[in-house]
Amino acid sequence: MSDAIDDDLYRRTEALLEPGDIRLNGVIVRTGLSGDEEPTLHQATLDVGDVISEAAGIDPGETYVYSGNDDERFGVNQHQGRTLEEEEFVWECQQLMRDGTYDVVFYYEADADQTAIVEGVEELGFDATGVRGD
C-alpha cells in the first residue's frame, strides 16, 4: 500500500468491492488537486477512466461519463463510465476531498488488467494504489 493513502481509505475501498453481482477491483488515485482545481480534477477523472477502459479491452472512444448531477441516486462527486452502445458499466468513481486535496476511488470489473491500470494511472503522474476485491 502506498504511503499516499491511509488505512481507513483503503479499508473503505475494500468494502466497496465486496461480492455482489459482479467481481470488482479498484484503484485509489491520490491527485494532489485542491477544490480550486476542479477542471483539472475533471480531466484527470476522464483520463483515468480511459486507462481503465483500455485495460478492460474497451475503446475509450466508445464510452461516456454518466455523472451524479444526472441522477438523484448518485452523489455529486460520483461518476460512472459506460459504453455508448449498450450503456454497460465500465467503471465508477467517487471523488473524495481529504486533507484539502482530492483522492478518487475507482472500481471496475475484476477481469480488467489491474497491473496496467495502476501503471497507467502512475504514468498520468498520480500516486495509485490497487485494491483487489477477491
Image (spheres, grey):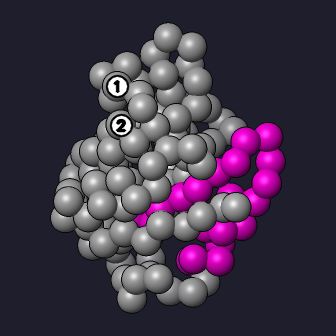
Q: Which residue is mark 2?
A: 54
Q: Which of the pair 113/130 is nearer the observer? A: 113
Q: Is residue 14 magenta?
A: yes
Image quarter of residue 51:
top left
Task: Give x and y (percent) for residue 42.
Answer: 30, 47
Residue range (magenta): 9-29
Q: Secondary structure at mark 1?
A: loop
Residue projecting furthest to the right: 20
Tell me: residue 83, above or below residue 32. above
**Disc 2 marks which amino acid?**
Glu
The quadrant of the image that shows the C terminus is bottom right
Q: Which of the pair 53/74 is nearer the observer? A: 53
Cβ atoms under marks 2 and 1 closer than 8 Å: yes
Q: Which mark is residue 74?
A: none
Q: Secondary structure at mark 2?
A: helix
- Mark before the other along the chain sequence, 2 or 1: 2
Q: Which residue is mark 1?
A: 59
Kindly report the distance in space between the C-alpha atoms of the residues bearing marks 2 and 1. 6 Å
Q: Is residue 69 visible?
A: no
Image quarter of residue 117:
bottom left
Task: Give x and y (percent) for residue 55.
Answer: 40, 42
Q: Could you tell me which residue is drawn at 50 percent across and 28 percent down?
A: 82
Task: Give x and y (percent) for residue 26.
Answer: 54, 58
Q: Could you tell me which residue is drawn at 66 percent across and 68 percent down?
A: 14
Q: Is residue 31 left or right of residue 66?
A: left
Task: Give x and y (percent) for residue 109.
Answer: 59, 43
**Disc 1 marks which amino acid?**
Asp
